[in-house]
Image: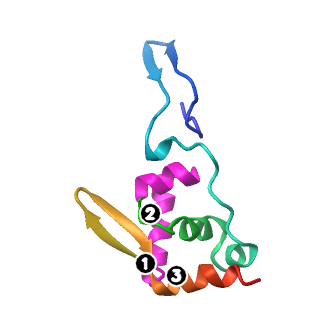
Amino acid sequence: MFVPVTPRQSWVCWESGRYAVVYPCSGVLADTGRAPAAPEALRALLGPARATVLVLLDRPKSTTHLVALTGQGLGSVGRHLKVLLDARLVQRRRAGRSVLYYRTAAGEVLVEAQGDG
């Protein structure tokens, strides 16, 4: 069963021999607010999903974190990050077991230019 947002309360499910316990998460991923909308011009240039990923990288984030924030699949987020890496709009670095993605100077300029309207 796919739950698109983090549940606010716990629940238990038992059907057809399958059991599940679902409970609210805590920490960084607990915010159930939707990802900020990317500016319309940036959405037209990059596509809505890829523009959202770029906008969310105001601070370094892992692929898993981006999946949780955007509601996109892991493969989709990975493909968007690959295109953004190839375009040199984002970079990555290892932090322990995680790989964190962040905007480059070019990515920053592209996002900030949208705020000038």
Query: Along the polypeptide, which appears first: circle 3 or circle 1?
Result: 1
Name the residue type under label 2: Gly
Q: Magenta includes 20?
A: no
Q: Position of residue 106 (x, y in %)?
A: 50, 87
Q: Residue at x 24, y 56 (%)?
A: 97
Residue beneath label 1, please? 85
Q: Residue at x 66, y 85 (%)?
A: 113
How far apart, in angstroms, are the residues tagged by discs 2 and 3?
Answer: 17 Å
How far apart, in angstroms, are the residues tagged by discs 2 and 1?
Answer: 10 Å
Q: Position of residue 62 (x, y in %)?
A: 39, 59
Which of the 4 image quarters holds residue 92?
A: bottom left
Q: Is residue 40 above or below residue 74?
A: below
Q: Residues within 10 Å of mark 2 (few under 14, many from 20)?
A: some
Q: Which residues are magenta?
A: 63-90
Query: Along the polypeptide, which appears first: circle 2 or circle 1?
Result: 2
Residue beneath label 2, please? 78
Which disc number belongs to residue 24?
none
Name the residue type under label 1: Leu
Q: Is residue 88 above or below residue 2?
A: below
Q: Position of residue 46 (x, y in %)?
A: 63, 76
Which of the 4 image quarters holds residue 45?
A: bottom right
Query: Along the polypeptide, which appears first: circle 2 or circle 3?
Result: 2
Q: Magenta includes 75?
A: yes
Name the residue type under label 3: Gly
Q: Quadrant of the C terminus?
A: bottom right
Q: Quadrant of the N terminus?
A: top right
**SS of the residue under disc 2:** helix
**SS of the residue under disc 3:** helix
Which disc number belongs to residue 107?
3
